[in-house]
Amino acid sequence: MSEEQRMEAAAAPPRLVAHGVHLAYDQRRVVHGVDLAVPTGRVTVIVGANGCGKSTLLRGLGRILRPVEGVVELDGHDLHRMRAREVASVLGLLPQQPVAPEGISVGDLVGRGRHPHQGAFGRWSADDADAVARALALTDTHDLAARRVEELSGGQRQRVWVAMMLAQDPHVLLLDEPTTYLDIAHQVDVLDLLADLNEERGTTVVMVLHDLNLAARYADHLVVMAAGRVVREGPPADVLDEDCVREAFGLVARVVADPVTGCPMVVPAGVRERRGLACSKVSLT
């Protein structure tokens, strides 16, 4: 995707918008009156402390959870009034702990991502086969295609789920903690893959991440939540400062420039540091 096309995509109206959305579980409200316009063709990352409502908001944006008040719109239409297949052809959601059918192979699971693109009779096409092969290759899971999902390690399983989402080829991709179970090298691999997907295809990516430094590195648009509300949003350099970290996480920290990217980098100040105790290394030689 050229830079001109990226600029055109960024200037396009938001396809996914939340208007005054309240979300609840068993009458217990978790998200309170959120207004959020997801920038088209950009990477949006939602961050916040545990229990702040970030995963719940993602479920509301992904049609898993119906708002008790407010509305989520996709291309100007109430998301919850649209047909499921119509939504799935545009929007894909990877939840935090997806469950695969017992005994299913990796290839078959990834192939399920093609269902929204198949007709009423579910005929398999050459395009479907190409999309699955491409998704397996991009996530380095091609050699796992014949294995059962339940046999895989947590990290392998997570890459397979990402492959299924890539096979679906949605215009808007929602992911809840896509780096769960992955070591740091594979975390960066998956996030690089999503960034490439955004850059090359213009796919709008929205994901929840716990790691603030990875969030700041990969986000075009950072959304910070606290107590079920959006407290800040915008480019990471404009949003992520020491006051923001203290407000959202109750954490005293320094925010400095990442030496690799120049993005904001959060350096926590623990109890020992606040007491003035520096970390020391004792030489044994």
Image: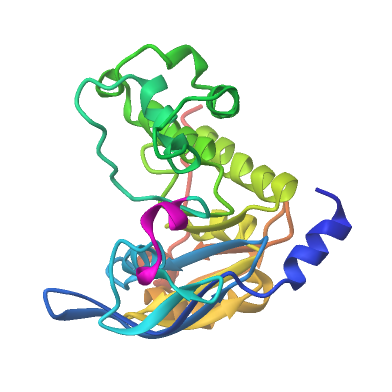
Q: Is residue 137 above or below residue 32?
A: above
Residue at 43% across / 28% down in the picture? Answer: 111
Front residue of this view, candidates 150 and 46: 150
On the picture, is 106 further left or further right than 126?
left
On the picture, is 59 further left or further right than 217?
left
Residue at 29% across / 17% down in the picture? Answer: 148
Give the main secondary structure, helix, strand or loop, of the magenta stretch.
Answer: helix
Is residue 201 something that shows in the picture? yes
* Residue 78 belongs to magenta span: no
Name the spot of residue 90 as percent of width and height, x first. 53, 55
Residue at 32% across / 21% down in the picture? Answer: 152
On the picture, is 27 further left or further right than 170?
left
Front residue of this view, candidates 73 and 211: 73
Name the spot of residue 139 as percent of width and height, x first. 54, 29
Q: Is residue 188 above or below residue 79?
A: above
Q: Which residues are magenta?
A: 80-88
Is residue 175 something that shows in the picture? no
Front residue of this view, candidates 43 and 281: 43
Residue at 50% across / 40% down in the picture? Answer: 117
Would you identify the image quadrant in which residue 3 lies? bottom right
* Residue 87 belongs to magenta span: yes
Name the spot of residue 60 as percent of width and height, x first. 35, 69
